[in-house]
Image (spheres, rainbow, N blue to C red):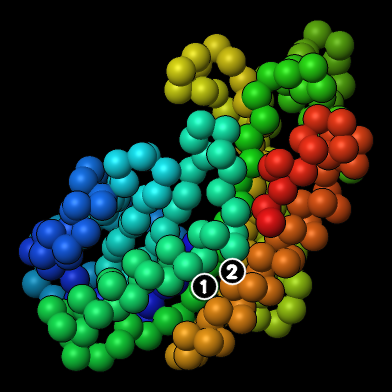
Amino acid sequence: MAKYFKPALELSSEHVGLYWARIKSEFPAARQQPPVGTEVPPLGADVFPMPRYWFTADDDVSLIQIQKNAFMFNWRRRNDVYPRYRSIKPDFDKYYALFSEFIRTEVSSAEPTMDLCELTYVNTVQRCEYWHGPQDTNAILPTFSMLTPGSDHWSSADLDCRFAFRMENTTHLQVAVRTGKTVQDPSVPILVFEIKATGQAGCITKSAADDWFDRAHKVIMECFLGMTSQHVQKEHWEREQYPS
């Protein structure tokens, strides 16, 4: 879940250090990553572009990310407990309010201007009885079809496909289907199914942004249920992995 700002915030690494001090008791681990998402223009007297900062919670479930033009909050599945939107959204609101207050008091007297909202759902499937590799992807996504190179001498190794849809004038949906590897065992393939909703906000209020996130969640849930196999949903997932 993310909010992008326009214009980008005049953040510096010094500001980030002050912000981390406010949340360090809950998010003790910090890392730097390259910026993501919409293009981040250079600001002020920065010699080098400011990176994206990760702040990870003790339980390794919650992750706050900030960069010059964005605040992001992520949740990751740990110990077979699947994060649910209805329980996650209040945490997003809580930490975004803290970040927004920090920007007003330490960086600028103005509220950050939201330009783009984003909600992403990522589901992974490891090798199992109904998926052994790319050739079995249509067992999970019935309408998905693998390309063939026209020769029996080739076998499916990896895939990386992306699709884009427009749900309404202000909301776009991107669906990605790709293979990957686990960190624990790189020899074990996984299937990654990602659904991302983005909406152009443009100086909207918090209540309007909340309404958009609720609509985006509904769209993502409908997309997930409509694209994945009903047989797999019923016989293997038992609704545990649904983005509710």
Q: Is residue 226 visible?
A: yes
Give the side of residue 164 with respect to residue 30, left or right: right
157 w.r.t. 29: above or below: above
Looking at the picture, which amino acid does disc 1 mark? Answer: Cys
Q: Relative to the observer, which residue lies in front, 3 or 170?
A: 3
Q: Secondary structure at mark 2?
A: strand
How many numbered discs sit on the rendered protein? 2
Q: Position of residue 78 (x, y in %)?
A: 49, 35
Q: Is residue 38 visible?
A: no
Q: Relative to the observer, which residue lies in front, 61 or 64?
A: 61
Q: Are marks 1 and 2 in contact (CB under 8 Å)?
A: yes
Looking at the picture, which amino acid does disc 2 mark? Answer: Thr
Q: Position of residue 188 (x, y in %)?
A: 59, 15
105 w.r.t. 196: above or below: below
Crowding at label 1, few (<14), some or many (≥20) Cα neighbours within 10 Å? many
Q: Secondary structure at mark 1?
A: strand
Identify residue for label 1: 117
Q: Residue at x 21, y 84 (%)?
A: 104
239 w.r.t. 154: above or below: below
